[in-house]
Image (cartoon, rainbow, N blue to C red):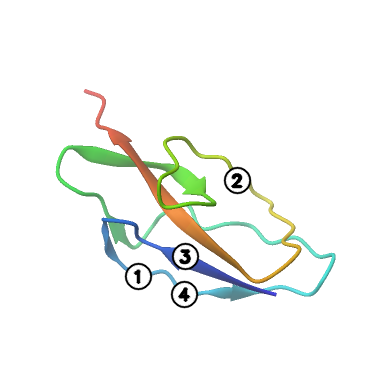
Amino acid sequence: YTITYNANGGTGEIASATVEAGESVNLSDGTGLTAPEGKEFAGWGLEATATEAEVTSPYTPTANTTLYAVWVDETT
């Protein structure tokens, strides 16, 4: 399966990952992405509208998957 990372409003790019069926992959920690103004990276979601990280690492996909960066308000 292929895991594709979507910056979801941020900028930058993370290379996709390929994993065999039944295997797990450690997800990117967001390195390589730049957050939108006033936001910080919180993790990965399964939909562009996710408001909290819902996918944990290591992740075992069951199909080709696009993960969307989840951005939250910056903490000071």
Label 1 – label 4 distance at C-alpha: 7 Å
Amino acid at pointer 2: Val
Q: Position of residue 30 (x, y in %)?
A: 41, 54
Name the residue that disc number 4 marks.
15
Mark 1 and mark 2: Cα distance apart in space: 19 Å
Q: Amino acid at mark 3?
A: Tyr
- Which of the numbered marks, if any, corresponds to residue 38? none
Query: Which mark identifies residue 55?
Result: 2
The image quadrant where one finds the N terminus is bottom right
Reading the image, the residue beneath label 1 is 13
- The residue tagged with tag 2: helix, strand or loop? loop
> The C terminus lies in which quarter of the figure?
top left
> Quick check: 51 above or below 9?
above
Residue 12 image offset from top left, x and y in percent: 28, 67
Percent across and percent down for residue 17 are 59, 73
Disc 1 + disc 4, Cβ < 8 Å: yes
The answer to which image quadrant residue 50 occupies is top left
Residue contact between numbered discs 4 and 3, judged by CB atoms under 8 Å? yes
Q: Earlier in the sequence, mark 4 or mark 3?
A: 3
Percent x, y for residue 57?
64, 48
User: How far apart are the alpha carbons under marks 4 and 3?
Assistant: 7 Å
Give the residue number, with chain letter if any, for mark 3.
5
Secondary structure of the residue carrying tag 1 is loop
Q: CA distance from mark 1 to mark 3?
A: 8 Å
Q: Residue 56 lies in what quarter of the image?
A: top right
Label 3 residue SS: strand
Dot 2 and dot 4 residues touching (CB under 8 Å): no
Lower sequence index among marks 1 and 2: 1
